[in-house]
Image (cartoon, helix red, strand yellow):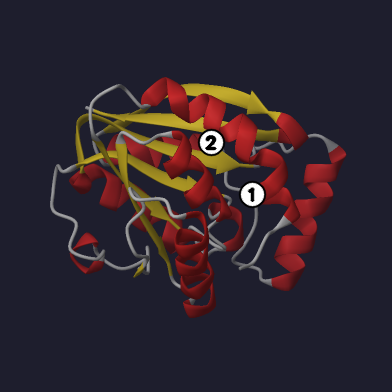
Amino acid sequence: MQAPAAAERNKGPILAVLREYAGPGELRVLEVGAGAGLHTAHFARALPQTLWQPSDIDPQALRSIAAYAEAMRVPNMLPPVLLDVSQGWETWGGTQPATLDLLISINMMHIAELRCTEGLFKGAGVLLKPGGVLFTYGPYAVDGRISPQSNVDFDRSLRLRNPAWGLRDIVLLRQLAEANGLRLERMVDMPANNKSLIFRKQ
């Protein structure tokens, strides 16, 4: 099992925001780009009313997610599925239209090509129930500006590694949301200069 330090640090603050959007009834959740699986196991255990479907494009990540599920014995955490968010929702592990209550993407957009972010919003527009929530977390640009300097430096380092990577601007995300039947409902400032974004399906 992989245990990224950042995931260990931010799992509590992210869960505190997620709790506000996880009501008492059973909820279907798809987590895109679940990575090592630490978040998945932590969130699914803390929110037993959810049926949590983790996914990732990396086979190594899928093995780590499965190891977390086995080690922590989280009964509402489904086996991970291979999912390329840049591909059409029809390839997303059999999830059917308008069946998801929550679609979650944590720290994915800035280390993926823009087509992955576009695919995430397209999928959300189809797969979320009316009133469902797309929850994203990470560092973002706001109206063309990146702050503080640590995020500027991080964005530069990402673009040096891959010119297609980098912090996405919330202006662009709002446009993608509206083009797919969602609206940006809330921005929550988080530790370490990150934000949680809440997009609601109309």
Residue 4: quadrant of the picture:
bottom right
Q: Residue at x 54, y 63 (%)?
A: 112
Alpha carbon separation for disc pair 1 and 2: 9 Å
**Residue matched to label 2:** 170
40 up-or-down from 128: above or below: below
Q: Residues within 10 Å of mark 1 (few under 14, many from 20)?
A: many
Q: Does residue 111 show up?
A: yes
Q: Residue at x 45, y 25 (%)?
A: 19
Q: Residue at x 80, y 46 (%)?
A: 152
Q: Quadrant of the N terminus?
A: bottom right
Dot 2 falls on a residue whose secondary structure is helix
104 up-or-down from 194: above or below: below
Q: Residue at x 73, y 38 (%)?
A: 146
Residue 66 is left or right of residue 101, and the answer is: right
**Residue matched to label 1:** 167
Residue 144: quadrant of the picture:
top right
Q: Amino acid at mark 1?
A: Leu
Give residue 9's mark: none
Dot 1 falls on a residue whose secondary structure is loop
Q: Amino acid at mark 2?
A: Ile
> In the displayed image of the protein, which residue is found farthest to the left?
97
Residue 127 is left or right of residue 18, and the answer is: left
